[in-house]
Amino acid sequence: MKSPSLASAASRSRASRSSPLPTRGLIVATTIGNGFEFFDLTVYSFFAVLLGKLFFPLASTQQQLLLSVGTFGVGFVARPLGGVLFGVLADRFGRVAAMNVTLLTMAAGTGLIGVTPTYAQIGIAAPLIVLAARLLQGFSAGGEVGVATALLAERAEPERRGFVTSWQFASQGAAALAGSLVGFLLSHFLDRAALESWGWRVPFLAGVLIAPLGLYLRARIGEEPAAGGDRAPGGVLRTVFRRDGRLVLLAFLLVIGGTSAHFIVLYYMSTYAIKVLHLPMDSALWCGILAGAVMLVMSPLGGAWSDRFGRKRVTFISRALLTLSILPGFYLIGHVPGVATLYAVVCVLAALHSINAGANGTLLPEMFPRSTRATGLSIAYAAGVSIFGGFAQFIVTWLIAVTGDPVAPAWYVIACGVLSLFALAFVTDRTRDAI
């Protein structure tokens, strides 16, 4: 006779197989929101200097950039709150319902940036509106990733769970690649006046079109009961902190190792190439394009390897190799200057990070019971990304200024990686288990 928990798992597995969408459609429908978020992050980062000039014209050039980047960082402050709210909604009322709300909220924030008049047109209201838009985006992003990752892990067949879930992180690479290419093409084909007048608005407004497509695709996923007979006793949030607090802490530590590497390798290396290595901007911008392309290809490979060799083994090996490689990588690009060295180091580091993301990204939802999975994962992910990802560029820039050491970013990633490896030792490997 089957136990209730096994029966519940079996019924969920049948529901997954009877989903109206095949696996490919499920992946696209689920990851489209995450890709939307990282596309916006990439575009905003690309036009940070221009946005500073348009919305903070009274400041000096350096202050304009700081205010623009600071406004970018505000979105990360709102992430933990979004993680809590949308995680609880997903665990109580269903994954798809929560994901649709996050997608609409994200589209509202992105569209608001695209239509906001500049400081020259409406004065101080302009930067305040952009600030509000970034808060909306961060709030929605805090819930989107955790909820969508939980859904992918639950709907996938156990023997292919790593590969299917890894596309959540491959979508980040695809979005970074698309955002970088769009920014590069606009900068290349438009003159300065056109770019400042209307060109910078194009990717933000075009991004809004993803929302109706995402809603259409997600309507075909089909909802299922949020937790069935496993509903959290005494409320989802209370159960997360009382029963699953240890799991949230371990997941948080696992997240910071990946997010520190992600924001340094995919986003900071272009700035590092310009400010520290003094390379031309056109050459530096290819760092993000190459890293995004590598992540798109290598994340699914890491997920597939974790299905075959085990989640913990692939996570440990890739994280350890990245932690050991990043310091020699920074030394190499400093002592053997040139774009060839820079691109080679970026590709190697991006490959190791991407393999890790594919495995670790599946390990995280497997850690939590289904009744609190979306909430626990969203809190851990949003908090980790907010602190150690969103502020990574600020932290490493400060470290370089204080220490005078150009390889300080490597030490930051190493410290976060060591903490993640420590946490990994206390995690149970549930590869191929019913969740």
Image (cartoon, grey):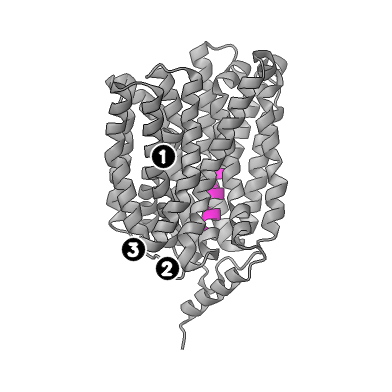
Q: Do the residues under discs 3 and 1 have CB atoms within 8 angstroms?
A: no
Q: Which mark is residue 435?
A: none
Q: CA distance from mark 2 to mark 1?
A: 27 Å
| Label 3 packing within 10 angstroms: few (<14), some (14-19), many (20+) | few
Let me know if residue 66 appears in the view.
no
Among numbered discs 3 and 1, the one appearing first in the sequence? 1
The residue shown at (65%, 24%) is 200
Kind of residue at disc 2: Arg
Kind of residue at disc 3: Thr
In the depicted structure, whether residue 110 falls above or below residue 141 = above
| Label 2 packing within 10 angstroms: few (<14), some (14-19), many (20+) | some
> Residue 297 lies in magenta, yes or no?
no
Q: Which residue is mark 1?
A: 350
- Farthest bottom residue in view: 1
Q: Position of residue 149 (x, y in %)?
A: 52, 55
The span shown in magenta is: 141-150
Q: Nearer the viewer, mark 2 or mark 1?
A: 1
Q: Which residue is mark 2?
A: 432
Q: Which residue is mark 3?
A: 428
Q: Position of residue 402 (x, y in %)?
A: 30, 20
Dominant SS in magenta: helix
Q: Is 176 or 100 nearer to us in this picture?
A: 176
Element type at mark 2: loop
Q: Position of residue 7 (x, y in %)?
A: 51, 80
Q: CA distance from mark 3 to mark 2?
A: 12 Å
Q: CA distance from mark 3 to mark 1?
A: 27 Å
Q: Nearer the viewer, mark 3 or mark 1?
A: 1
